Image (cartoon, grey):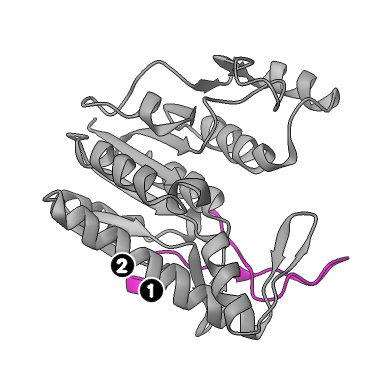
Amino acid sequence: MNKLYIIKIGGNVLDDEKSLKSFLKDFASIQAPKILIHGGGKIATKLGDQLGIQSQYIKGRRITDAQTLDVVTMVYGGLVNKQIVSQLQAHHCNAMGFTGADGNLISAKKRPVGEIDYGFVGDITPESVNSTLLYFLLKQNVIPVFAPLTHSEGVMLNTNADTIASVLAISLSKHFDVRLIFCFEKQGVLTDVDKEDSVINNLTYSLYQDLLAKGSFHDGILPKLENSFSAIQAGVKEVLIGEHTHLLANTGYDTKGTLITQA
């Protein structure tokens, strides 16, 4: 079975022009089918502020009202996505930018109102993915670049980029030997956020549960960990978390960072 690299980059890479250029060069060097998923929250917040649309967060998660939905659709699906695609073209990558609405690649259900009304936010499952069309695109040597947007009943929905990466990995694992990589600014998952050398090289599910109970993890890493173990438990071959210069090489895979395993 052919390898497929599904790689997610977050805001700290996107916000720094030098880091983004370095990442895209490394990403382009991977000699295998690949998919890129990006965030862009800080850029959306900055543009929203300029437009007089203030971002609201509850427990670190963005509330997406109608005005905010317009902003994130413009920023994620337009500005950030097309900048990435154009830069990949400069590296001779046949990249194409997508939201979940394009080709009905990722449908969603609007999150129901519970204790918190998150607004226009989409929840997805592996069954949400049009894996047949994605498989065809990859076989045509297209490199999909996904913005963190899905759709439902004619409405765009803001959707967590880590979740999109995990769900794509699970859905496509029936066609490919999938390596899922979460790239961010740290060297890997840390037991102490203030100590860069506290990287966990191999994080098993039992160790994750132990450290979680002790409150060892910073809130920002939890969605990545939740999505990583969901992917592993659903048959994804490997999941890596860390800084891109240590995770991406000519082979597309290195042993540094944090390797997520079931046992």
Span colored in magenta: 102-125
**SS for dot 1:** helix
Q: Within 10 angstroms of label 2, few (less than 14), some, or many (20 or more) residues?
A: some
Q: Nearer the viewer, residue 95 or 152?
A: 95
Q: Label for residue 82? A: 2
Residue 66 shown left or right of residue 82 in the figure = right
Q: Residue at x 54, y 78 (%)?
A: 71
Tell me, yes or no, if residue 136 can be seen here: no
Q: Label for residue 246? A: none
Q: Nearer the viewer, residue 235 or 196?
A: 196
Task: Please name the amino acid that badge 1 sits on.
Answer: Gly
Q: Residue at x 68, y 42 (%)?
A: 220
- Magenta segment includes 47: no
- Magenta-highlighted stretch: main secondary structure? loop
Which residue is labeled 1 in the image?
78
Mark 1 to mark 2: distance in Å?
6 Å
Q: Quadrant of residue 112?
A: bottom right
Task: Please name the amino acid that badge 2 sits on.
Answer: Lys
User: In the rendering, at what x and y percent does residue 241 appear?
Assistant: 51, 30
